[in-house]
Image (cartoon, rainbow, N blue to C red):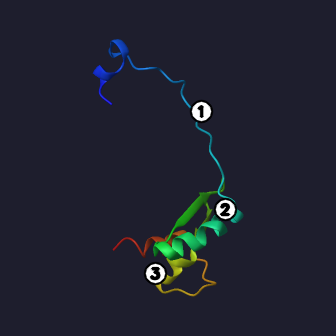
Amino acid sequence: MSDSSWPRGERLRFPPVPVRERSLSPRLLAAAEPILAVAGIGAWYYRANNDGGGELWWSAQTRVIHGVADDSRPELASAIDFYLP
């Protein structure tokens, strides 16, 4: 919609939506698996720990795309090697 289509050319101001960090739960990630498989795309998620390490999750489709075993749990450093030359 153009500005001129609003009364007196003014837009309504909506209050900002607070940004809240939400954790990806194992249940939510598992629910996404069939959608990712049908779409033929993979997904990954990395959560950093306070100690400098972190936890990396790969979808089953990401494992298929990269040709790794279903039970493979890649570390961040080796996972990056799949994406960067």
State the mark number for residue 18. Answer: 1
Q: Which residue is mark 2?
A: 28
Q: How dense is the environment of label 1, judged by Cα within 10 Å: few (below 14), some, or many (20 and up)?
A: few
Q: Label 1 sits on what residue type?
A: Pro
Q: Confirm or deny contact between disc 1 and disc 2 (CB under 8 A).
A: no
Among numbered discs 1 and 2, the one appearing first in the sequence? 1
- Residue at 64% over, 84% down: 71
- Residue at 36% over, 20% down: 6
Among numbered discs 3 and 1, the one appearing first in the sequence? 1
Q: CA distance from mark 1 to mark 2?
A: 22 Å
Q: Label 2 sits on what residue type?
A: Leu
Q: x and y percent of residue 29 in the render?
A: 64, 65
- Residue at 51% over, 24% down: 14
Q: x and y percent of residue 42 in the render?
A: 49, 72
Q: Quadrant of the C terminus?
A: bottom left
Among numbered discs 2 and 3, the one appearing first in the sequence? 2
Q: Which residue is mark 3?
A: 65
Return the residue found at the far top: 8
Tell me if residue 24 comes above or below residue 37 in the rendering: above
